[in-house]
Structures are given as structure tokens and as C-alpha cells.
Image: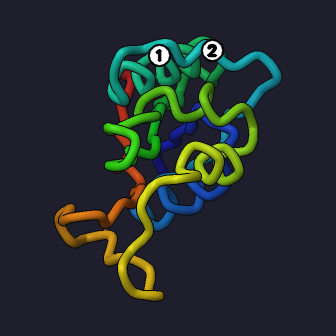
Amino acid sequence: MPRLALASGNLHKLEELRRALPGFEIELLGRDDPPPEDGATYEDNARIKARWGRTHALDDTWTVGEDSGIESVALGGAPGVRTARWAAGDPVGRMLEALTGEDEPESGEPPDPHAPPSGSRRRASPKPSSACLEAQ
């Protein structure tokens, strides 16, 4: 069975990857010395993690990196690729703080995250992950 190492500390990403690739033996390669996520795009950060993982994984193991973030319409697309640094360990609290004073949906119902922006409806939605695979 092919082996894959996910260069991340995120257990939920590991579970998602295992469901998506049932033919692989997949392990988490989280360490105390992760690389800086200073890329300009999600793909850049995923590639940084994959290359970092390549230096720490077993020789017979493929490595994969991932990145994701939150892009808020009310914040002009921020925090985007810088979500992890911007959130400083408290993404929900930081987002609520940043959205304080922004317009609420007109009804008491939460906005549909798939609906296009309209009028005063403001929302934040997760940005799909980018993943990069590094060869053995």
C-alpha cells in the first residue's frame, strides 16, 4: 500500500484525506517546528508544507501539504491566505471582533453561505484547501 505523510497538525484534514484516498496509508507529520506559512497564495503555503514534510518523512513516503483560510465579503476578502497568522489562535473570536458593527442579515436566520452577496448581507465562508504533492 502506498504511504503518504500529511505535513500538518490538523487531525480533521487527516481524516478528510483518509476518506478521500482509501488506498493509501496516511499519517500526520505534525512537529514542533512547522515551516512559516508566508506564501502569497493557498497553493504557495501548501507547497511550502509539502517540501518541509519531504525533509521529515521516510524515504518511501509521499508528502502532501495543504492550506485553507476564511475569506469574508464584509472584510473585503480578508483574512484569506493569512487567516492562521491573523487569527492568532482564536479564529472565531478574531472574526467576530472584526465583524463587529458590520450589517446583519435582515431576518433572524443565518445567511445562506452559497448565496451571492446582496444588499446588507455580510458573511464569511471557508476557502477550499489547496494541496500540493511532493514526489518521493
Residue 9 bears which disc, if any? none
- Residue at x 41% of width, y 61% of height: 103
- Residue at x 69% of width, y 39% of height: 9
How many C-alpha atoms fall within 10 Å of the one at disc 2: few (<14), some, or many (≥20)? Answer: some
Q: In this view, does 80 lie above or below 120?
A: above
Residue located farthest toward the right when viewing the structure as drawn: 32
Residue 7: quadrant of the picture:
top right
The reply to whether discs 1 and 2 touch (Cβ–Cβ < 8 Å) is: yes
**Residue nearer the viewer, 73 or 60:** 73
Under tag 1, what secondary structure? helix
Is 78 left, or right, of 98 in this rendering? Answer: left
Q: Mark 2 points at which residue?
A: 35
**Residue nearer the viewer, 123 or 57:** 123
Q: Where is residue 100 in the image (x, y as percent from the top left)?
A: 58, 52
**Residue type at the position of mark 2:** Pro
- Residue at x 36% of width, y 80% of height: 106
Is 127 left, or right, of 108 in this rendering? Answer: left
Q: Mark 1 points at which residue?
A: 48
Residue 6: quadrant of the picture:
top right
Is 89 left, or right, of 42 in this rendering? Answer: right
